[in-house]
Amino acid sequence: MRIFLVLFFSITMLTLQAQLVNQGGTITVKSGATLVVESNLTNTTGSIVLESGATLEITGNFTNQATMNFNAASEVIFTGSSNSQVTSSGGTFGKVRVDKTSANVVLADDMIINGQLNFAGTNAKVVLGGNDLTMGSSSSVAGAGGSNYVVATGSGRFIKPISANSTLTFEVGDNDVSTNYSPLSAAITGSGYSSATVGVNLVNAVHPNKPGTSSDYLTRYWNVLAGGITGYSANLTGTYIAGNDVVGTQSLIDGASYNGADWDYTNAAHSGSTVSSTATNTDIGFTGFKKGDVVLNLTAYIEGYMDGGSMRPVLQNSGETGTGTQCDNLTVELRNATAPYALAHTF
């Protein structure tokens, strides 16, 4: 037997204090109505429908194993002071409000939000883990900052679509030791866009390919992956935590991107607690360290005057000033690799 639970009211509120399990029925929340579940909501074999303007408020876990049809103008609100685990099973959310107190929405699989993601609580976050959070083409983020943001320190990425030259902001941070909001801004330009997206996660650690000679660097890096963009270029700006993420002298640290083989310092700069640079590779790691820290190991075999089986110092033989162990003066010039091979440094 199919059970249909239809909610028509728009002013009153229906509250279910026990967990709600739907096994084959259809739960429809009409426009203007609110269904409050003060525990877990599990949809095993039925369907849940949220019409435009409908609201579903959940204190516990949301588990969809069947069909969910949520209008883009509907809203799911996660409340309470304990974590809510969310299983979408391929379903799409409209608006999502995280209105928790010192608790998080934790993804158990990938999540898609077509409306606004609103951080309305206190110390409330969305934790990705190994799952992606993908925003729709008309979606937005509100209330992020401080202690409210997307925790993206796992393998999952915070993904946003892009269809034309514009700037995307990824409201990400970590929750590893303390609250560390470290958003990344990406000003994207390209010559063509086809189902294009940019995804970001971050690591609260030193980039594994940081040049070993650099003594001024960040202990944080962002992974940026773009797809569907022809002629891709991104001006990246990352915000770090000055009290936690800096080794050495902060004012010497500029942005740099790693493409899997080489570091790119194009437009490398810094300002306050941000680093920036331009990347043209679609899959990079982005961090900050002092550029120009390079060691050149040079071996030179020097000719000289032989005297009794040993080399007489040329300086001494030429009447130049030098110690008894000095043979000659060497000048090392570093020049640009392209014509006219301008002198870059002399030692």
Image (tube, grey):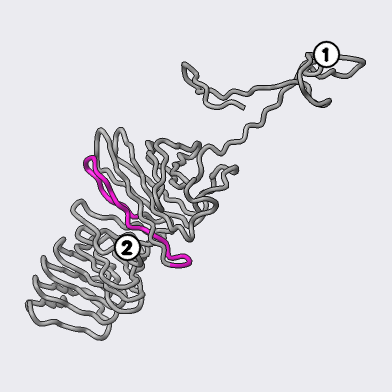
The residue depicted at 16 percent of the width and 75 percent of the height is 2
**Label of residue 305 in the image:** 1
The residue depicted at 29 percent of the width and 41 percent of the height is 188
Q: Is residue 323 above or below residue 69?
A: above
Q: Between 191 and 169, which is closer to the camera in this rendering?
A: 169
Say how many tags the image has: 2
The residue wearing badge 2 is: 145
Left or right: 292 in relation to 133 = right
Magenta segment range? 158-178
The residue depicted at 76 percent of the width and 18 percent of the height is 320
Q: Between 204 and 215, which is closer to the camera in this rendering?
A: 215
Q: Is residue 85 visible?
A: no
The residue depicted at 23 percent of the width and 80 percent of the height is 37
Amino acid marked by disc 1? Tyr
Q: How far across and down, in percent of the image, does residue 189 sit? A: 28, 37
Q: Nearer the viewer, mark 1 or mark 2?
A: 1
